[in-house]
Image (tube, rainbow, N blue to C red):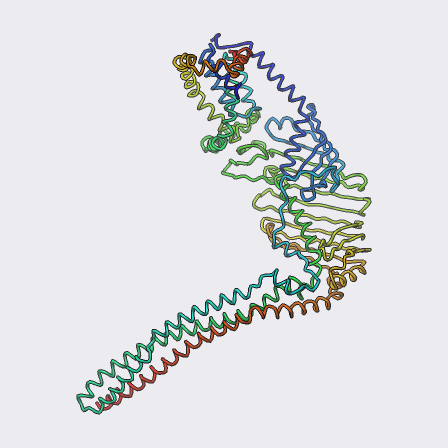
Amino acid sequence: MKKWIRWPGLIGFVVVVGVVIALWFLFLDGIVRRMVEKGGTAIVGAEVDLAGAHVTLIPLGITLQGLQVTDPQAPEKNSIEIARIAFSLDSLNLFRRKVIINEMSAEGMRFGAARKRPGKVVVPPEKAPAAREKETALPSFTIPDVKMVLQQEKLESPALIEQAQADLKKKSEAWQKTVASMPDNAALDAYQARAQKLRDAKKGGLKGLKDAAADALALTKDLNRDLDTVKKAKAAFGTDLAAARALVEEAERLPLEDVRRIADKYSISSEGLQNLSQMLFGGAVRSWIDRGMLWYGRLKPMFERSGDKKGNVQTVKPLRGNGVDVRFKEDRPLPDFLIGVIKASLQPESGTFTGTIRNITPDQAVLGKPLTFAFTGSGMKNAKGAEITGTLDHRKATFPDDTLEIAVRGYQAAGITLSSAASLPVSLQEGEMDLEVKGRRDAKTIAARCVARVKGARLDTGSDASGGAFANAIRSSLSKVSAFSLTADITGTPENYQVRVSSDLDKVMKDAAGSVVREHRDRIEKELRKAVQEKTEAKLAGLRESMGGLGAQGGKLDGVQDRLNGLLKESGASGGGKLKLW
Amino acid sequence: MIKMIANLLKILNSDADPSQISLALGFALVSGLLPFFSPLSLLILLIVFLLRVNLSAYLLGTAFFSGVAYLLDPLLHRIGLAILTAGPLEGLWTTLYNSTIWRIQRFNNSVIMGSFVFGILCFIPLVLLANSLIRRYREHVLAWVKKTRLMQAFTASKFYDIYMKASGWGWGGLS
């Protein structure tokens, strides 16, 4: 046994472990700094920088200085800067791998501050889908050259008319075959001859009458069979003819739809004229909301953790690391990560703006409390007062319930871009704004209303006059506006929501630009109609001709039916005469 | 890499007891599969220092099995998850989960549990296999290898210089 034990090894072990611990302490501050930068970058998707970190062991606490979070959508700016963050950790729970921070203070918060150099964007922000871009695109207000427009825009009607014509031709050919399979003139003449023979037999005495009765029965049977076939074919033909007529009517409408679609793109429809604010400001409002939703998604791991639960056992993905952590029922349940309260304050030059965020944990179900936040501002330079409150309740992961309320009074707005459309940029240069936001989001729906009331407003609409008469009319009307309100209603599902913007500016803009828009629209429609007609006229004529061809097959069927009916009558008369004799 | 191979040859060709080398490789397997900074790794390191096992083989083996662990992660995760979610063991895990000492081990992580169980199960087979292979190598291959022209040319090469340097380090032969 002694041979296997190496007692000096104990000293070696103590030395090795001692050196590792000493090195760890020596580089601990750097390790924490890199962990914050790496973890933060992974969550935000853009560079996170930390000027310094300091760890104290007794009591266990961490102080972070100069935290900068790059804005993924504008890397030359920081979405948030925090001068100092300090907190102490519950060391006993740390041994149980639970990060419990009872209180954290964040001082010197600033939003949107410029960076010394642009930050790296690790995960590029999601691009707006084409449908959304279309929704917020502003049409050109200059009268476009219709030839150029038709080169750029694909007309759908010619192809659809050609398709309709091909369908009709196919049907017509099918019916030609069907009609050809009906009794032809030779067959009908043969029936005629048989009927004549019956009439002649009536004059041939008793024997002739007996033979004629059998022939008359056979002829009537044959005629009825053919007549049934023709009747069935006619019924089917009637259905096909009605469908073909509908197809032709639809095809005749297609050029007009092309005209309307293209005109909508290059001018404003009457519906659009009623709600110009949606067209002008919808894009900007949508981008603000999209940005909020993007941050909500990025911060979601901080208040909701994904995982599967089977009985008393739950598997949860660790915030970082490999594998999954399996949780078992705890005697005294505590979340794996918890910040009890963050006391935050904004930069002093912004006035007094303080707030608290409570219960930050991805394990709300374990804690039994939702994340809440409340910020109040007073005596600020740029606003008379502000209140932000909200709850992110994810205690039941399948039934989240989030609410947000923002009320800002007397905000001195300056340089807010309301529309970035090249043809008609609109920005609020100055004005006193009252803002109210109320929103709610659950698993299936999102509903929010945002109302901004501005007084003492000065709107800038740019100096570029290339937008034409419409833009000039809008510019002129907006330059006279001194007070207005803007309402954005957000409805839909969290994955697909719509933003409707309305404003009392609508009436002002409609009155100013209504006649210009209508005149513009009429001119475009007229020119487009002419151009589209030239491209589709010949095709429509061909379609109508095909329709005529199909109709002719119906005439042939009618002719066959009429002759068969006549022959049936004739054979009935021949047979009937004979029967009367009996 | 050349140094590593040189070290391996040095260990195999040394006079160290094959059981000391194979036992070191067994411990290296468990250490290599577990995360570097874990209390269990520390415990194994203590055992390795206390027991008369070949330290060079342990360090070399740990480096090798750490690399293997990355490839085996998906398998180890599955094994660990199956063990941790096995109904009959739920009571045991729940008791351990409520104990701070065990929580420090992070036994409830699927990869750590999988690595530990896999390491323990493979420990004895690996020790026996390595022991047998080292003995066979020394009995049958070593003498033949030394006689080959290739080996003779090799002893005159730069590689052999490195090998000789490694021989002189001293710690490499610590046993």
Q: Position of residue A453 (x, y in %)?
A: 76, 55
Q: Residue furthest left?
A: A207
> In terms of image quadrants, where is residue A501?
bottom right
Residue at image x 68%, y 39%? Answer: A358
Q: Please state which of residues A313 and A241 is positioned toward the viewer in this rendering.
A: A241
Query: Can I make out residue A328 in this image?
Result: no
Looking at the rendered image, the quarter that the C terminus of chain A falls into is bottom left
Please name whichever residue, A8 or A528, is drawn nearer the observer in this view of the structure: A528
Q: Is residue A431 left or right of residue A438?
A: right
Left or right side of A464 for B18: left
> Residue sitting at 54 percent across and 15 percent down?
B162
Is any part of residue A342 visible from this angle? yes
Q: Camera-side residue: A97 or A212?
A: A212
Residue A184, image x, y percentages? 33, 78
Residue found 58% across the figure and 61% down from its top: A154
Q: Tally the marks.
A: 0
| Residue A141 vs residue B76, the one in the foreground | A141
Percent across and percent down for residue A512 are 76, 65
The answer to whether residue B6 is left or right of residue A181 is right
Q: Is residue A174 above or below residue A47?
A: below
Above or below, B3 against A463 in this view is above
Residue A524: x and y in percent read 66, 67
Q: Is residue A375 above or below residue B173?
A: below
* Image vertical order of residue B128 relative to residue A168, above or below: above
